[in-house]
Structure formats: C-alpha cells, structure tokens
Image (tube, rainbow, N blue to C red):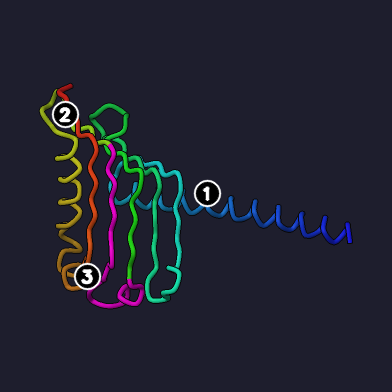
C-alpha cells in the first residue's frame, strides 16, 4: 500500500511539473504573438483558459500582469501595465464572419505617455505602426475581403493612472 501511495505521489509531482512547464510555454507563445503584432517587447505572468462552468457554449481566456514596453526611440520601460485582460467568447463564432464576445474585461493599471526629443509620442508611434500594417499594398485587397467583424456584448474597462512626460 505504501508503495502505491509513493508511486501515485510521484505521478502527481510529474504531472504538476508538466502542467507548470506547459503553462510557461503558453505564456511565452502569447508574449511572442503580441510582440509580433505590436512590434513591442511584452511580458506576461500567466495565461489562463477555461470552459465556463455550467456552460459549454463559452470559453474564457485571461492574461495576468501583461506589461507592454515602449517602442524604439523611447526609454526601455513599461508603457502600459495591465493586471488583467480577460475575454469570454462564443467559440463557434471564430469560424463565422462575426466573432461574438460575451464580455471583454480590460484592467489598465498604468499608462506612461511620453514625448521624445524628436517630438513623437509613444502612443502615436504605436498607432502608426498598426495603421501601416492595415494598409500594406500587397495584402490590402485580399485582407479587406476576409476581415472579420467583431460583436462585443459587454465591455468593462478600468483605468488607473495615466502619466504624461516630455523627455
């Protein structure tokens, strides 16, 4: 009996270590995806995923402690700090023309807006990089015909501190 308990304990430890390693791998994948999309360095503490209890028609994703760093030309420090970003989506809509979110919750704790010596503001530089991606000539025609619509039933936005500084 003691041997069985020891074996079960070892399996539980191995499973826990595997789950921890897998979760860290997921965080790195999400960090890389956000960094690729924004062109900025990001860090994430934890990513969670779940099918909501009592409801198989919705899934939820949550990112804990997402930090987005400044674009090039600004100090290498946090630009945006989100303690939590969570979405609840109807998964079947991911394959339809309109993606439906039951709820999106964004908690922005801290934003540091900066104007560099060249007169550029970090938020504007980030916005310009998104605009440039949206109108790339090679993909403009094809992308516009495949672009999905988004429907959000409820958006909860919490904003903490916003700072502005001239460098």
| 108 to 150, vertically: above or below | above
Which quadrant of the rendered structure holds the C terminus?
top left
Q: Secondary structure at mark 2?
A: strand
Magenta highlight: main SS: strand
> How far across and down, in percent of the image, does residue 103 sit?
28, 63
Cα distance between the residues tagged 2 and 1: 34 Å
Relative side of 9 to 17, left or right: right
Q: Quadrant of residue 110?
A: top left
Relative side of 116 to 88, left or right: left
- Tally of numbered tags: 3
Give the residue pinned by disc 3.
Answer: 148
Counting residues from the N terminus, which is met first, the one under dot 2 or under dot 3? 3
Q: Which mark is residue 164?
A: 2
Q: Secondary structure at mark 3?
A: loop
Relative side of 49 to 135, left or right: right
Give the residue pinned by disc 1.
Answer: 24
On whether residue 99 falls in the magenta region, the answer is yes
Q: Rate crowding at label 2 as few (under 14), some (14 to 19) or many (20 or more) other CA atoms within 10 Å.
A: few
> How far across and down, in percent of the image, does residue 160 sit?
24, 38
On whether residue 110 falls in the magenta region, the answer is no
Residue nearer the viewer, 50 or 139: 50
Cα distance between the residues tagged 3 and 1: 30 Å
Counting residues from the N terminus, which is met first, the one under dot 3 or under dot 1? 1
Q: Secondary structure at mark 1?
A: helix
Q: Rate crowding at label 3 as few (under 14), some (14 to 19) or many (20 or more) other CA atoms within 10 Å.
A: some
Q: Quadrant of residue 154?
A: bottom left
Residue nearer the viewer, 64 or 113: 64
Q: Quadrant of residue 113?
A: top left
| 128 to 19, vertically: above or below | above
Cα distance between the residues tagged 2 and 3: 35 Å
């Amino acid at each position: 009996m003691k041997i069985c308990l020891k074996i079960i304990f070892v399996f539980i430890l191995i499973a826990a270590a595997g789950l921890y390693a897998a979760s860290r791998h997921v965080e790195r994948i999400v960090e890389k995806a956000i960094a690729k999309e924004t062109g900025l360095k990001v860090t994430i503490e934890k990513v969670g995923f779940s099918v909501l209890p009592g409801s198989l028609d919705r899934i939820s994703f949550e990112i804990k402690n997402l930090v987005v760093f400044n674009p090039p030309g600004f100090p290498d420090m946090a630009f945006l700090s989100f303690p939590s970003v969570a979405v609840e989506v109807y998964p079947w809509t991911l394959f339809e023309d309109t993606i439906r979110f039951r709820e999106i919750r964004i908690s922005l704790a801290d934003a540091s807006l900066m104007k560099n010596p060249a007169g550029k503001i970090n938020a504007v530089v980030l916005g310009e990089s998104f605009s440039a991606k949206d109108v790339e000539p090679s993909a403009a025609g094809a992308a516009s015909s495949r672009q999905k619509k988004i429907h959000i039933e409820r958006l909860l936005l919490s904003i903490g501190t916003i700072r502005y500084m001239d460098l």
